[in-house]
Amino acid sequence: MFASPSTVLVRYSRTAFVITLSPSEPFGADARLPGGRFARYVSDPVSGIWRVIGNSPKELVCPFALQQVEIGRHGIAVVVRLPATGDTRAYEGDVDQVASNLHRAGRARGCRADRQGVFWALREFCAAVQRQAAARGVC
């Protein structure tokens, strides 16, 4: 199963929600799509970020796995790790900027997923961070 609020560290400061993901457990976020379908986005420390739409096979969105997500008033910051090498990177800006930078880094590593998939994955992970913070009363 995916990480629950008890296994994910959520902090809140006056300027941001911060979630640190487990280095060993996948973390998932679900999204409702038009037509009553669902997509599941998963950041897996072993294989990167992938998504499943309905009963389709999983599709790699980004070879980097999320380690930390910070949501501020004016943007986000993420720390990602390439499972194969341990290469760690940080990106910050609005969701669109971070998605573009993360997509470019993934393309440089041979991932052929589209940028839009990275964008929607980040949006759903940010929404999951906010839901977990609310569930823990960290707001």
Image: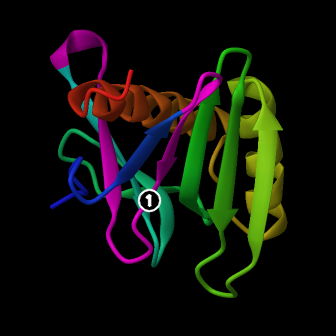
How far across and how far down the image is residue 125, in percent? 45, 37
Q: Quadrant of residue 118?
A: top right
Where is 106 relative to 96, above or below?
below
Q: Residue at x 71, y 40 (%)?
A: 77
Membership of 103 in magenta stretch? no
Membership of 27 in magenta stretch? yes
Q: Quadrant of residue 54?
A: top left
Q: Residue at x 41, y 44 (%)?
A: 10
Where is 29 relative to 45, above or below?
above
Where is 58 relative to 12, above or below?
below
Q: Which residue is mark 1?
A: 21
How far across and how far down the image is residue 100, in percent? 79, 38
Would residue 82 be visible to someone looking at this image? yes
| Tally of marks | 1
Magenta stretch: give its range.
13-36
Q: Amino acid at mark 1?
A: Leu
Q: Quadrant of the C terminus?
A: top left
Q: Residue at x 40, y 26 (%)?
A: 130
* Label 1 crowd bin: few (<14), some (14–19), many (20+), radius 10 Å: many
Where is 101 relative to 81, above or below?
above
How far across and how far down the image is residue 44, in percent? 42, 66
How far across and how far down the image is residue 79, in percent? 67, 56
